[in-house]
Image (spheres, rainbow, N blue to C red):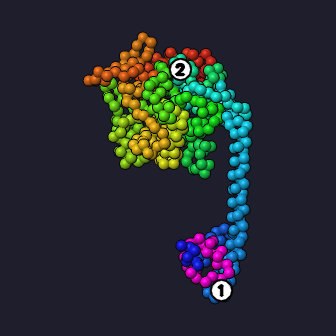
Amino acid sequence: IRGSVIGSRRRVPGEDVLFALAGEPFGYECAVEMAATRLRTTGLLPTRSLGRTGSGRAETNAVLSSYALQYTRRRWIQRSLVILSALLILYMTVWNMLMGAGSPKAGASVGGRTVRGGGRVAAYDGHVVLAVATNTTAESLSIFINSWNTYAPGHRIVVFAESDILDAPGVAQYLRELHVDTVKVHRPPLLDDIFDEEEPEKPGRLALASLRQVAKFVGTNGVIDWATVKGVALVTTAGDVVLQGDPFEDNSVKQYIPKQGIVLALNGGPELGAVRVATDTEMLSSLRDCFGMNMAEKMSKLSLINGHVVLGAHRGMSEFLDLVVDVLGTRTRERCLGNWRADLAAIQYSVGEFGRDPRNVDFPFSLRDHVTSTVYGARYGLPCKIDSAGILRRRPPEGSARRGPTPTVISQYSSSSYLRDMYRGRYSHYARERVDFDHRPGE
């Protein structure tokens, strides 16, 4: 269209550049104004009157052409620098691939020690546990780690935590002895937009920073070569989760790992049955803060997802994390940063809104109810009896003869004082001699 409009009229020298600079298929008068405005914003054209007809028009074209040439040269230099930067990045990427794509990233640590880079990473053909341990204590973290090492000692655990926990007396040595990898989580704006004026101490920022760090860790071959990893567990609240079996031995998880998918649990209890979002005031409040009243009302009718533990394959987990980080980091932003459980709200929204249509997501996923899922949320009633070994076993729901398998992961156990005391007595003593559980940040 631009070519036909310009070509339909007689042009004088300089108008080719003029109309190209204006970038719009309008008449001469508009083109002059737009070109002059654009040049003035770049500082190339001083404020002056421009002729429109006769010799004034020719003079105008000559002036604009002169400044447009400077403008074009500047743009050419800028684009050349961008191309050179891209080529340099490509060269460095190829070089790193040839020298070993699996070199550890700075900022992560292996066995409790910070890795500065260098060396190839050996293939790992087991399962990886990604444990977010923010807003928790060293004792709760030790309970989590010791329970996993008791029931699934072959798993590789990576803990994402703030320096308040990782730098507490005895913690680094304790984690190093257990061969636990650690990644320090820094609150935004270090991981966020440096020009963002939001307060970095807002609780939702820590959730956003943690998930971004995990997504970055999962998305690249750094400490771990993901090509040979069998399965991945994402634990968003490591300080409130224990193991009583190997979750990767569950048939539903085994089924979805070859499909490169993930498995999530739904909350519920033997008396309450399936729990809806509307019955959980904390989740409903988080959804209102993050997504507004209308979306919270829409979500209130859906089943409540247990976002504390997600199991599945590496590729599905990586794509799931990217989706949740995108929802939390761009769609909610300022509204959600003041909420303590912004990460769980983002998981509920991602699955409830996008997951309704499988075409919206790039990974298969399964939602297991509270009767059959390998993950059980203790907040909604104990599923069981508790046997002599302290294992929580399911009993049939009211009015049903169906009893599901024994859950291998218990989340939200801190909601029960009995479970909290039981797990503290069973697991925390393993670390008590080496870790100062009474230490508080700043002391």
Instruction: For label 1, count other residues whose C-alpha is less than 10 Å away and answer few (under 14), some (14-19) or many (20+).
Output: few
Q: Residue 330 appears at what percent x and percent y?
A: 51, 48
Residue at image x 50%, y 35%? Answer: 260
Query: In the rendered view, does 316 fall on the left or right side of 80?
Result: left
Q: Are marks 1 and 2 in contact (CB under 8 Å)?
A: no
Residue at image x 69%, y 44%? Answer: 93
Residue at image x 62%, y 72%? Answer: 20
Q: Callout 1, which amino acid?
A: Gly
Q: Residue 95 appears at what percent x and percent y?
A: 73, 42
Disc 1/disc 2 C-alpha distance (Å): 84 Å
Residue 56 circle label: 1
Q: Dividing the picture into quarters, in which one does residue 60 lie?
A: bottom right
- Residue wearing tag 2: 152
The C terminus sits in image quarter? top right
* Whether residue 132 is situated above or below residue 356 in the rendered picture: above
**Hey, which residue is sitting farthest bottom in the picture?**
54
Residues drawn in magenta: 8-29
Query: In the rendered view, does 322 fall on the left or right side of 392?
Result: right
Asked whether 19 falls inside the magenta stretch, the response is yes
